[in-house]
Image (cartoon, grey):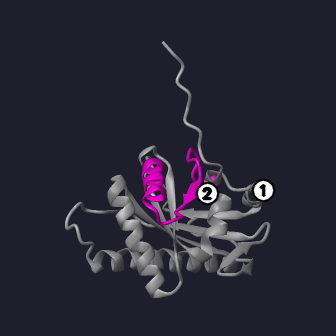
Amino acid sequence: MGITEAPSQPESIRPALPMRWLGTTLRVHLVGGGLLPADGAVIAAQRADLPALRAVFERCFPGRQGVVEQAGSTLADRQAHIDRLQAGLDVLVPVEADSTGARHAIACAIQLARAAGKSISPVGVHVGTGLTAGVSVLPLPWARGVIVVEAPFRVPEQPEQVPDAWTAAILHLLNRASGLARDYLATWQHTGRRPGTGG
């Protein structure tokens, strides 16, 4: 019986070394981590939150192999993301801050999830201390952060034309996750205790 080699994985799955080091210094409170599907998911997160999420992804979600950010608009790019999802990896869809860009990104996430037979997991992230770099917030070492995972949205196969209501529902879940992350962090900073814990 021959030996089957594991397929090589793109380098972008693991964050760069400085980001991995940063992830070890952050104090992170995770809410709803068990809701993230175990076999690969389309993760929707606000673009400003991506540096913090990338830094702590593997630490907060043990056993996962990091996230590949959706990039490119060709059919080959889309097929590559579908293949990754079907192999059990995660694909991250950045959601823009403006409503038009957000709806477009979520519509793309819906099409990707449907094609791969996966669900969409809205994730909210908030960090207490960070540097603004363009549209993103880069957390500082030893900052506090909260990640909130909403229940996955399973994309139905029909109708073929994606209803606006689906996009609005996922955007609502994403905004709620982000708001909860902000509120949990404010409570943590005010009381000195992680929400729902004794410390």
Q: Mark 2 Cα within 10 Å, few/some/many (few <14, many 20+)?
A: some
Determine whether, in the image, residue 182 is placed left or right of residue 73: right
Q: Which residues are magenta?
A: 58-85
Q: Nearer the viewer, residue 49 or 197?
A: 49
Residue at 20% from the left image edge and 64% from the top image edge: 158
Q: Residue at x 42, y 78 (%)?
A: 104
The verdict on residue 130 being magenta is: no
Q: Which residue is mark 1?
A: 21
Q: Is residue 180 above or below residue 28?
A: below
* Residue 76 in picture, x, y percent from top left: 46, 55
- Reading the image, the residue beneath label 2 is 57
Q: CA distance from mark 1 to mark 2?
A: 12 Å
Q: Nearer the viewer, residue 164 or 149?
A: 164
Secondary-structure class at tag 1: helix
Instruction: Report x, y in % for residue 13.
Output: 61, 52
The C terminus lies in quadrant = bottom right
Residue 166 position within the rendered picture, expressed as x and y whole percent measured from the top left: 30, 74
> Is residue 118 among the parts visible in the rendering?
yes
